[in-house]
């Protein structure tokens, strides 16, 4: 598998150097792997800090900026960051009003953020955490690691970030973040596996005639494999899985997310079908996002995330944002 | 067993993880995200480096430094889990300059308990606990069966080697026993029934690390 890299060992650092060169609005520390707003912490504003494995770009570094995150800590490819990164990012982003950690529900992310939060608390930093777990492909149970955090992370970071800009207190920002997560559901479909630079070959084999349903964002196989079908049927499978878990209705915000290796034209083909299936079920798509936002390296495929909006959430979604990957209204 | 013995253990574990890196990654690719081998290799390489930079004087301090390094450098779930296991094992050994096989059995048990707590994992969940718990039990059992002379640290190569052989065998057996299990913790749990038929990579690496202990004791 050909990769546009200098070497598998330096991919994350090299990419961070590129992010630094491309986005003067960010302050990037490639060595310690932290992405901050160049403008520094704003006194009295709750700081939003997120992070996770690399390979999901633009998540999370691409969402640092006005109206969204204050800091991001990228780990190795598909590996959560270490507590040191999270502590340093939290300390650097802290504006005196507390820090909200946005954590995707994976064992590694949860453990590393928890250790970091405990150490931050020992140093007198007020930290709250919100766990994102929107993926309906994973059956939630007390006896498993629980649902994965996937596409809803973008909604949580955007909407909670907008509220934080208004000067809302930590408890309020955390409440809205949790509400967005509770109102959001996702489902992903892979047309191919992805290839991690260090592994050099695809994480699983998928023939031309097959798709994986219910994939996560780390190249892990999904819950089941089925015959390759057209966009209408695949979009239908995703909407049906979401609807079974949380019946779709009313005004919804929908993200049709590309996994990294699927062209935008196909994502729009899929979005048309998703919108149709949602309309058939009585939901109204009032806000949408189509593109590569929570990727899985070069995986071909897409995920659908549906968030049931309220007036407050719609207003916060519409609020200005200025980050490398999302920008409007400013 | 003194600080040098424990440093030698970590060096041997690092060597073993490096040699089997691709195999661990292959196991992880089947039911996880294909990075267990490279992550552990990175972590143990850093641990060996840290021990070289600042060699601690007691077995407890060696394990504490290894644990802290793994927490700081590895990431993922295995960093905090292995890191905490080594830290808690180190704490259990206290500040003694030499420790017995019985002390080590206690430390291993403390390490396993820490992993159980932090990962909310029990035996049968298809995790590293499935290799570590039987190893700790086998070591404790072997020490009970051949009690050491009171107060004396057992000379290297005699008592501990046999007890540690039992622990390494139990860890390997435990790791292999994860193959038919359905994962209930960690990333493999997302696969549900599809996780059956694959060895858990964390249990496999745990067995390697316990085996390294035995290899060093037999020298």
Image (spheres, coloured by chain):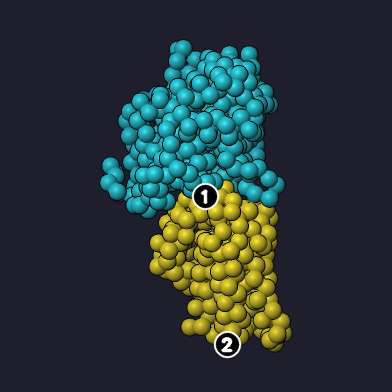
Chain colours: A cyan, B yellow
Q: How many marks?
A: 2
Asked if marks 1 and 2 touch (Cβ < 8 Å), the reply is: no
Q: Residue at x 44, y 27 (%)?
A: A270
Label 1, label 2: how far apart the Cα atoms are: 38 Å
Q: Between residues B185 and A87, which one lies in front from this camera angle?
A: B185
Residue A211 at x, y percent in the picture: 44, 42
In this figure, which residue is indicated by the disc labeled 1? B76
Q: Which secondary structure, mark 2?
A: loop
Number of the front mark, 1 or 2: 1
Picture disc at residue B158: 2
Q: Between residues A242 and B56, which one lies in front from this camera angle?
A: A242
Q: Between residues A244 and B80, which one lies in front from this camera angle?
A: A244
Residue A270 visible (yes or no): yes
Q: Residue at x 63, y 21 (%)?
A: A249
Q: Which secondary structure, mark 1?
A: loop
Give above or below for B92 relative to B147: above
Give above or below for B70 relative to A28: below
The quarter holding residue B157 reads bottom right
């Amino acid at each position: 598998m050909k990769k546009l890299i200098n070497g598998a060992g330096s991919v994350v650092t090299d990419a961070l150097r590129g992010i630094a060169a491309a986005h003067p609005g960010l302050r990037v520390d490639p060595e310690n792997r932290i992405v901050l707003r160049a403008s520094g912490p704003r006194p009295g504003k709750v700081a939003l800090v997120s992070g996770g494995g690399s390979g999901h770009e633009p998540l999370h570094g691409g969402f640092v900026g006005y109206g969204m995150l204050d800091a991001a800590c990228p780990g190795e490819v598909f590996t959560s960051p270490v507590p040191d990164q999270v502590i340093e990012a939290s300390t650097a982003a802290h504006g005196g009003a507390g820090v909200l950690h946005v954590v995707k529900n994976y064992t590694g992310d949860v453990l590393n953020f928890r250790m970091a939060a405990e150490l931050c608390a020992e140093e007198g930093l007020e930290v709250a955490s919100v766990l994102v777990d929107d993926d309906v492909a994973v059956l939630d149970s007390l006896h498993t690691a629980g649902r994965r955090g996937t596409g809803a992370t973008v909604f949580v970071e955007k909407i909670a970030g907008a509220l934080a800009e208004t000067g809302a207190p930590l408890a309020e920002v955390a409440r809205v973040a949790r509400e967005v997560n509770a109102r959001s559901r996702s489902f992903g479909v892979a047309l191919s596996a992805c290839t991690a630079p260090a592994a050099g070959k695809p994480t699983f084999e998928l023939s031309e005639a097959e798709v994986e349903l219910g994939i996560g964002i780390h190249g892990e196989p999904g819950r089941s494999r089925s015959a390759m079908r057209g966009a209408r049927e695949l979009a239908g499978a995703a909407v049906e899985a979401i609807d079974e878990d949380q019946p779709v209705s009313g005004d919804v915000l929908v993200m049709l997310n590309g996994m990294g290796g699927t062209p935008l034209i196909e994502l729009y083909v899929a979005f048309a079908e998703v919108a149709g299936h949602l309309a058939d079920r009585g939901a109204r798509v009032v806000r949408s996002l189509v593109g590569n936002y929570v990727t899985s390296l070069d995986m071909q495929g897409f995920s659908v995330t549906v968030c049931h909006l309220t007036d407050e959430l719609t207003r916060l979604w519409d609020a200005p944002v200025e980050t490398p990957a999302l920008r409007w209204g400013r | 067993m003194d600080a040098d013995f424990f440093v030698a253990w970590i060096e041997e574990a690092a060597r073993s993880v490096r040699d089997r890196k691709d195999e661990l990654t292959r196991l992880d690719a089947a039911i996880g995200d294909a990075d267990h081998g490279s992550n552990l290799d990175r972590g143990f390489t850093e641990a060996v480096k840290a021990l070289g930079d600042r060699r601690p004087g007691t077995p407890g301090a060696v394990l504490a430094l290894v644990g802290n390094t793994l927490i700081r450098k590895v990431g993922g779930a295995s960093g905090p889990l292995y890191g905490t296991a080594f830290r808690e094992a180190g704490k259990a050994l206290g500040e003694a300059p030499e420790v017995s096989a019985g002390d080590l059995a206690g430390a291993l048990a403390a390490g396993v308990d820490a992993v159980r707590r932090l990962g909310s994992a029990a035996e049968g969940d298809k995790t590293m606990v499935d290799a570590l718990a039987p190893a700790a039990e086998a070591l404790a059992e072997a020490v009970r069966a051949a009690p050491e002379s009171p107060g004396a640290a057992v000379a290297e190569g005699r008592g501990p080697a046999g007890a540690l052989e039992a622990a390494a065998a139990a860890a390997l057996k435990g790791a292999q026993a994860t193959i038919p299990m359905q994962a209930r913790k960690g990333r493999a749990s997302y696969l549900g029934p599809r996780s059956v038929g694959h060895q858990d990579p964390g249990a496999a690496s745990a067995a390697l690390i316990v085996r390294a202990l035995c290899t060093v004791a037999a020298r």
